[in-house]
Image (spheres, helix red, strand yellow):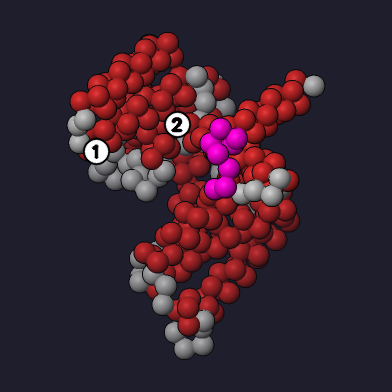
Amino acid sequence: MSSIETLSDPPPPDAKDRSAAEAFARLLAIMRRLRDPKTGCPWDQVQTFDTIAPYTIEEAYEVTDAIARQDWDALRDELGDLLLQVVYHARIAEERGLFDATAVVNAVADKMVRRHPHVFGDPAALSQGTHTEAWERLKAEERAARALTGVLAGVPNALPALTRALQLSKRAAQAGFDWPDATAVLKKLGEETKELEAEMAAGFSSDRLAEEIGDMLFVQVNLARKLGLDPEACLRAANAKFERRFQAVEQALAHVGKIPSEASLEEMERLWAEVKRAETSSARA
């Protein structure tokens, strides 16, 4: 199937769909009012794609944070904030004569239909086992249609470095350029560690050291991928654990009238070990 016209139409909208459409239309009207050059908000009037983009990234992270905390009320609010970013960019585009919100919604709806021929076409067209391969093939065809050539084309530069490394390595792996298993990646990590040690011992420049650190991080991303883990999620969890344990150390110091800068390293390491043991015992209980 080469186009969505050959696929069956999605079901007609139900009452909830119509209610959502009305709410979305209300948000579009609010944004249009905010951007009105005469009666709008002075701050909103002067925003551009470039000035809004950082907020878009920030809101996406806040959505992820709400999910990690399983704070569903916050997730509802953060999804709304993220949707506002979409509406904001669409409104600026409409003002410039590029496209509008309707084009944005239709584009993603058409894409979802096109990428799911087993749902909107022949149910037997794809099994669950082959869906991922077909999805990636369709994405590659779409990149080719946009003149994005090469296996690695189209991976956004603005992605967090760990996430972009994961996407790049996934693309390369789909093309057959990959380690055979996690053990092989772990061996490569050992090699990279030795190279870093050699650079440190030789006293080479910070540029050389940065390159070796980067190589190590990239290999670690691939190790996580081979183990079926998301490296970004792994690091977020490690950050949260460090934050939790360090705050516990701060609290322990506060009980004796100290702050971290007034404590010795040995004292803080002792308290850290106590916090770690307490967490381990609690997890086993």
Q: Is residue 263 magenta?
A: yes
Q: Residue at x 26, y 33 (%)?
A: 209
Which numbered marker is on residue 250? Answer: none
Question: Which residue is at the far right?
Answer: 285
Q: Is residue 203 magenta?
A: no
Please name whichever residue, 113 or 105, is drawn nearer the observer in this view of the structure. 105
How many tags in the picture?
2
Residue named by callout 1: 206
Q: Which residues are magenta?
A: 261-268
Q: Residue at x 25, y 24 (%)?
A: 201
Residue 80 in picture, x, y percent from top left: 61, 59
Q: Residue at x 29, y 25 (%)?
A: 196
Q: Is residue 52 visible?
A: yes
Amino acid on which the number 2 mark rests in the picture: Trp
* Residue 128 placement, left or right of 170: right
Residue 20 in picture, x, y percent from top left: 66, 59
Residue 12 in picture, x, y percent from top left: 64, 50
Residue 219 picture quarter: top left
Residue 188 in picture, x, y percent from top left: 34, 16
* Residue 282 placement, left or right of 10: right
Please name whichever residue, 155 or 183, is drawn nearer the observer in this view of the structure. 183
Q: Is residue 126 visible?
A: no
Residue named by callout 2: 135
Q: Residue at x 42, y 28 (%)?
A: 221
